């Protein structure tokens, strides 16, 4: 695991997930922060700037449906940990017009400007 450093303690950096097997027209851009506190603070700071970032996902084994019908054996600490650190960046139709502003705001928020 990478060492956390910087104002938002970026742990794994950033990336884009897409499938190699299919043509993916909806990539997911994300940040991996060091802990839930940084995750929550980052989302709040972006919201204050007018940019809506969200939790990436709720692990199925902790969702109401997953707890009702799932068959998890033992703890899933990596899944739970990542769920509290991944932030999905905005992606919407027409984003191209606002892309530079979103990127500039994000870079300023995490201190990379």
Image (cartoon, rainbow, N blue to C red):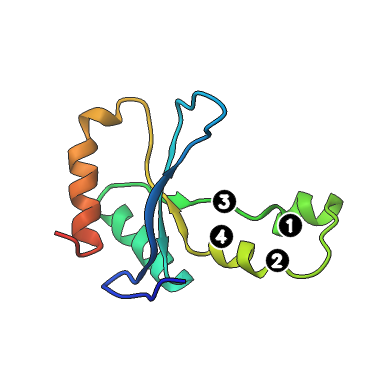
Distance Cα–Cα, label 1 vs label 3: 11 Å
Reply above or below: 18 against 61: above
Instruction: Specify few, some or many for label 1: CA neighbours under 10 Å numbering under 14, 14-19, or 20 or more.
Output: some
Q: Position of residue 36 (x, y in %)?
A: 48, 70
Mark 2 residue element = loop
Distance Cα–Cα, label 4 vs label 2: 11 Å
Numbered label attached to residue 90: none
Nearer to us of marks 4 and 2 is 2
Marks 4/3 in contact by CB < 8 Å: the verdict is: yes
Q: Position of residue 42 (x, y in %)?
A: 35, 62
Distance Cα–Cα, label 1 vs label 2: 8 Å
Distance Cα–Cα, label 1 vs label 4: 11 Å
Instruction: Specify few, some or many for label 4: CA neighbours under 10 Å numbering under 14, 14-19, or 20 or more.
Output: some
Sequence-first disc among 4 and 2: 2
Distance Cα–Cα, label 2 vs label 3: 15 Å
Numbered label attached to residue 83: 4
Marks 1/2 in contact by CB < 8 Å: the verdict is: yes
Label 2 belongs to which residue? 76
Label 1 belongs to which residue? 61
Nearer to us of marks 2 and 3 is 2
Label 3 belongs to which residue? 57
């Amino acid at each position: 695991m990478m060492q956390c450093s910087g104002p938002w303690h970026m742990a794994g950096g950033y990336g884009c997930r897409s499938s190699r097997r299919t043509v993916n027209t909806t990539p997911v851009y994300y940040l991996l922060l060091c802990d839930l506190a940084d995750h929550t603070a980052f989302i709040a700071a972006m919201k204050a700037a007018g940019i809506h970032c969200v939790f990436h996902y709720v692990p199925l084994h902790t969702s109401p449906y997953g707890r009702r019908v799932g068959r998890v054996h033992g703890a899933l600490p990596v899944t739970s940990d990542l769920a509290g650190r991944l932030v999905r960046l905005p992606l919407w139709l027409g984003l191209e017009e606002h892309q530079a502003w979103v990127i500039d705001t994000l870079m300023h928020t995490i201190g990379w400007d």
